Amino acid sequence: MNLTSKVPKIELILHPHQVLDLDETQHQMAIECKSGVLWVTHSNEIQDYMLRAGKRYTSKAKGKIVIEAFDEACVNIEEQ
C-alpha cells in the first residue's frame, strides 16, 4: 500500500504481513506502534527496527520508509 496524505498525522490499521510504503518521503516521520508488532526499514539507515506497542521510531533523514505488520497492528504516522 502506498500512502499519500495531506494531513500531518494519520492512524492506520495494518493486517498481518501488510506492507506500507512511504516512498521517498518529503519530510522526516515519526512512526508509533499503538498495538501489534511492526518492522520498519529506512533507505538511509543501516539497521531496521522492530516496534511493539508503545514504541516509536523517528527518521533522522528523508528517504523511503517501509513498514510491515507482523500481526494486526495499529500505527500512527506523523510528519516532523
Image: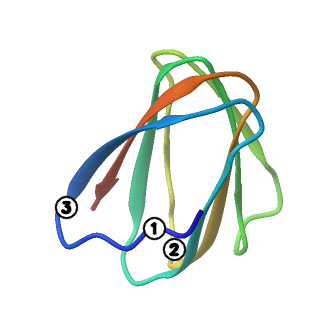
Callout 1 amino acid: Leu
Where is residue 38, by image quadrant? Answer: top right
Element carrying mark 1: loop
Quadrant of the frame with the N terminus: bottom right
Task: Say which residue appears at 40% left-offset and 68% top-offset.
Answer: 28
User: Which numbered disc, 3 or 1, marks the residue that appears first in the sequence?
Assistant: 1
Where is residue 31, by image quadrant? Answer: top left
Q: Position of residue 64 (x, y in %)?
A: 62, 75
Q: Which residue has dot 2 on it?
A: 61
User: Which is more toward the observer, 66 or 5?
Assistant: 5
Q: Which residue has dot 3 on it?
A: 8
Q: Are marks 2 and 1 in contact (CB under 8 Å)?
A: no
Colour scheme: rainbow
* Disc number for residue 3: 1
Q: How many marks?
A: 3
Quadrant of the frame with the C terminus: bottom left
User: Which is more toward the observer, 10 or 53?
Assistant: 10
Q: Position of residue 67 (x, y in %)?
A: 65, 50
Q: In 3D space, how far apart are the residues under numbered discs 3 and 2 (Cα atoms)? A: 17 Å
Q: Nearer the viewer, mark 3 or mark 2?
A: 3
